[in-house]
């Protein structure tokens, strides 16, 4: 009796796994779309930004900084701070993520779905 390397049921199993992986990828890729970002200056909320509209944002309170909203994500586009750490942070899009510009005391964060959820690293509540 001759045994084949792959049988018909093996192909169906692989097709099912590929379909499940594709569905999982689609769910994760659209998860960051839309939503809101919060911008804090000196721990005080100064703005909420809708992430569903692509644009460049300049804040009146800190005109030296530009933020970019693109495909449900936000990032520091430019800043006049010396080390540019905020610019190098890149895009944030998931709940709980944040980016900081320490010289300007500015924080951009994606709020978590439940307002009373603690930070996963420190266990403390975020502002």
Image: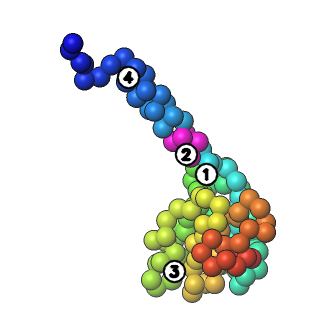
Residue that mark 1 sits on:
32
Mark 1 is surrounded, within 10 Å at the Cα level, by few (under 14), some (14 to 19) or many (20 or more) other residues, namely some
Residue 6 drawn at (x, y percent) = 29, 22
Q: Which mark is residue 80?
A: 3
Distance from Cα at disc 2 to Cα at disc 4: 27 Å
* Mark pair 2, 1: CA separation: 7 Å
**Residue at screen point 52% across, 75% down:** 86
Please rate how many residues cluster around mark 4, counting C-alpha atoms within 10 Å: few if below 14, some from 14 to 19, many from 20.
few
| Residue highlighted by disc 4 | 11
Q: Earlier in the sequence, mark 4 or mark 3?
A: 4
* Residue at horizontal 45 percent and vertical 71 percent from the top: 88
Task: Give the camera-side residue of 16 and 38.
Answer: 16
Tell me which residue sits at (76%, 73%) in the image.
46
In the current view of this chain or complex, which residue is farthest to the top? 1
Can residue 78 be seen here? yes
- Quarter of the picture holding the C terminus: bottom right
Question: Which residue, given by chain and number where applicable, does mark 2 sit on?
Answer: 29
């Amino acid at each position: 009796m001759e045994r084949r390397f792959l049988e018909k049921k093996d192909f169906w199993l692989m097709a099912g796994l590929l379909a499940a992986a594709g569905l999982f990828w689609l769910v994760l890729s659209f998860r960051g779309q839309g939503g809101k970002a919060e911008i804090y200056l000196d721990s005080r909320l100064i703005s909420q930004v809708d992430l569903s509209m692509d644009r460049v944002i300049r804040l009146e309170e800190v005109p030296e900084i530009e933020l970019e909203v693109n495909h449900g994500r936000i990032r520091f586009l430019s800043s006049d701070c010396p080390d540019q750490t905020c610019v190098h942070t890149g895009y944030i899009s998931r709940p709980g993520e944040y980016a900081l510009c320490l010289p300007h005391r500015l924080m951009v964060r994606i709020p978590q779905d439940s307002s009373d959820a603690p930070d996963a690293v420190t266990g403390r509540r975020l502002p």
